[in-house]
Amino acid sequence: MMYQYVFHFLVIGLLLFAVADNTYQQQTRQISRQLFVDQRGGTPYKTIASAVAFVAPGDTIILVKGSGPYREILNIKKNGTIIAPIIVEGNGETITGFDSMRFTFDGKAWIYTLSKPFDTEPVVITKDGRRILQDENTGNFLGPIQLRDDGKTFELTLGTSTNGWEISTRWFVVAITSTSHHVYRNIIATGSLNDGFNLHGYGINIIFENITGYNNLDEGFSSHDTISCTVNNGRFWANDNGMANVNDCITNVTNVMIYDNVGYGLFLNANTTHNLVDVSVWNNGAIQIRFDNRASGTATRVSVWKPSWNLPPWRRYKESRTIKNSTTLGSNAALTPIPFWTGTPQIMTTPTPSRKGIM
């Protein structure tokens, strides 16, 4: 009789294991969908937003290589899970807040008129992908375009083509708001009226791999509130600030280059905590690295180069707009030892890194 009980117990156990294994396999199948996006057609989704509407934990949204740029906002409002994160594979495509500038001829020149004065609501303007900056002293734009005295009308220099001009029109490009367990890979974010990568609220296990943020009006990357995230391989340039994180966020940053931003390079404020590894910062207009308040963390192989100018060469529109002098290290970062930090940025005397091969 005892053997029968044992036998029945083993059989029931095996049946329960089989049911559990089948359920797990079904769940695994359910959480491994690939949602392909190609605005040219030929895939189930032509926009990022349409794929986002159907995404679920474990799914991967894939931008088909060569299908961009995408002129919309990537904002996933659903959480993934620890074992089934939501993944976005950008394949090196661009998500942008830029739209083409449509010039009209007023009998004298080709013009484009803003809805509000530039000084009130500044924008980013590019020609063939290159940002047109303003001279700090004169306010003149450093390209074949100028702002008329009304403060709203842009006029092209005589003989300049109307092709290839873009203007920032969308507030966000890649936005994360109080969501967790996301992975963002191989994405370029440009043309935002705010940050290229903007993180707000509460969120954990948010991972960025091989991302680029450039030509954004505020930061290339900015984390706020109590977000906890990781950035592995990043390039941030031609923004107002390269990377600026605030509040109580926690950020792990590895293999990141921050350069040619008009204001701050790396700006960490408030109660932020960072682990910085293999970070290089150079040629930013105002301050290369600035730590404020109780920003804390570790710095391992953090390299910074002194700029070749003493005064900011370009006009800035955000946090650094009142800075009068250009420095290598600012606020707490300039102190020795640095309060609340383990390790210190190393001021380099070698030539600045080459941009060759930088996305």
Image: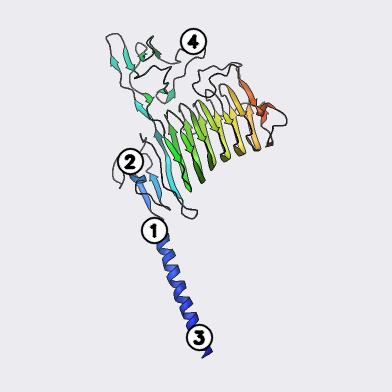
Q: Position of residue 350 (x, y in %)?
A: 65, 27
In front of the other: 286 or 202:
202
**Kind of residue at disc 4:** Thr
Q: Is residue 32 visible?
A: yes
Q: Which residue is mark 3?
A: 5
**Kind of residue at disc 1:** Gln
Q: Which residue is mark 4?
A: 138
Q: Which residue is mark 2?
A: 47
Q: Is residue 357 visible?
A: no
Q: Which residue is mark 1?
A: 30
Is residue 154 a member of the stretch shown in magenta? no
Residue 189 placement: quadrant: top left
Q: Are marks 3 and 1 in contact (CB under 8 Å)?
A: no
Magenta region: 313-319
Q: Position of residue 317 (x, y in %)?
A: 49, 21
Q: Could you tell which of marks 4 and 1 lies nearer the N-terminus?
A: 1
Q: Could you tell which of marks 2 and 3 lies nearer the N-terminus?
A: 3
Q: Could you tell which of marks 3 and 1 lies nearer the N-terminus?
A: 3
Which dot, 4 or 3, sits closer to the camera?
Answer: 3
Q: Identify the residue at image location x=47%, y=43%.
A: 178
Secondary structure of residue under mark 4: loop
In front of the other: 341 or 214:
341
Q: Could you tell which of marks 4 and 2 lies nearer the N-terminus?
A: 2
Q: CA distance from mark 4 to mark 1?
A: 59 Å
